[in-house]
Amino acid sequence: TNIEILKKLEDAHPIIPLIMEYRELQKLVSTYIDTLPVLVKEDGRIHSTFNQMGAVTGRFSSNDPNLQNIPVKGEYGKVIRDAFVADKNHTLVSFDYSQIELRIAAVLSNDTFLKKVFQEGRDVHSSVASKVFGVPENEITPEMRRRAKVINFGIVYGMGVTALQANLGSTRAEAETFYKNYFEEFPTIAGYLEGVKKEALEKGYTETLFGRRRFFPALRSKIPYIRASAERMAINAPIQGTAADCIKLAIVRAEEALKKEGLLLYSHLILQVHDELVYEIADEKVDDAIAVITRAMESVLDEKVPAVDRIPLSVHVGMGKTWGSLKD
């Protein structure tokens, strides 16, 4: 029985949560604990293969082993990540783009409100909640913010009313009202998404901000649900694809900047996960390298976006001696 069904039945019998817990533990044991130690090479390290064309969005994939799906949540995930240890006199440093897809959505849609929120450094979910619910920002409740967060990310992923209802945990009528209110308050975003869909139907492909194309032959399918699925993916593709372009450009720009500053021998990129780069940096050069890498990552959109429309790309930095113990 798949996990979605088990979640729905969770309260039906005391054994169901136990089955779910058993499965989680079994997966951790078989996928990581039994497997990873066997893959350690003579140099004491595990070497993954990164595939440049591994995902349709343009992101890297990782295999043999896949180091991009090491668990991040829960106590067990942290314990497994703690097995990844920095070399002697080195520190692991992660650089993670914060809310990059929402920032790119603001750039691509050219929505004045969203751009201003990011330019002023305000909390985007609280700001959107304030607009959609018609309440001052200082009166936004945690539940209102949670709902705004669901729809913010949902719009980026082409989420419809049904998916929104499931993610909000609300009634269909409530989800429909929320969906409608959002697009009434953000007509620029609605217009942008509709324009992407229309252009994709005409051309058969979408383009990222940097001009990389993704083709959608299924848009011409005669089967409605296949066509609808392709439309949702096409709407999301320029946003997700531009985020994928940004992380790849960040790798190149950071490398160039480290070389220029004489820090390349001390800073080694060891992993790329989603919107995050993980480096192993010599302790005596950590502060210098952090400044250089952060600056390089934050400026990847500058050549494509006029200064007046620019939105700051925010990079969150964590560091520690193990992958599981990274702190701000």
Image (tube, helix red, strand yellow):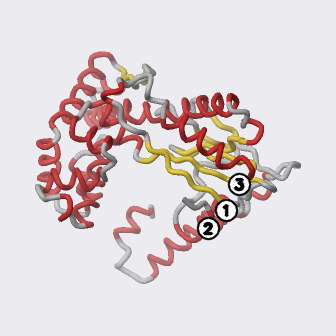
Which residue has dot 1 on it? Answer: 30
Lower position in the chain sequence, tag 3 or tag 1: 1
At 59% from the left edge and 65% from the top edge, which residue is drawn? 77
- Secondary structure under the numbered disc 3 in the rendered image: strand
User: Is residue 212 or residue 105 the one in the foreground?
Assistant: 105
CB under 8 Å between discs 2 and 3: no
For the view shown, which residue lies furthest in the right direction?
42
User: Is residue 318 or residue 260 the one in the foreground?
Assistant: 260
Q: Where, quadrant-wise, is the C terminus in this rendering?
A: bottom right
At 12% from the left edge and 46% from the top edge, which residue is drawn? 180
Name which residue type carries label 1.
Ser
Which residue has dot 2 on it? Answer: 26
Which percent across, then down, holds residue 277?
A: 59, 44
Which residue has dot 3 on it? Answer: 91
User: Is residue 80 or residue 227 the one in the foreground?
Assistant: 80
CB under 8 Å between discs 1 and 2: yes
Measured in 3D between alpha carbons, the distance from the residue under mark 1 to the one under mark 2, in whole angstroms, is 6 Å
CB under 8 Å between discs 3 and 1: no
136 lies left or right of 154: left
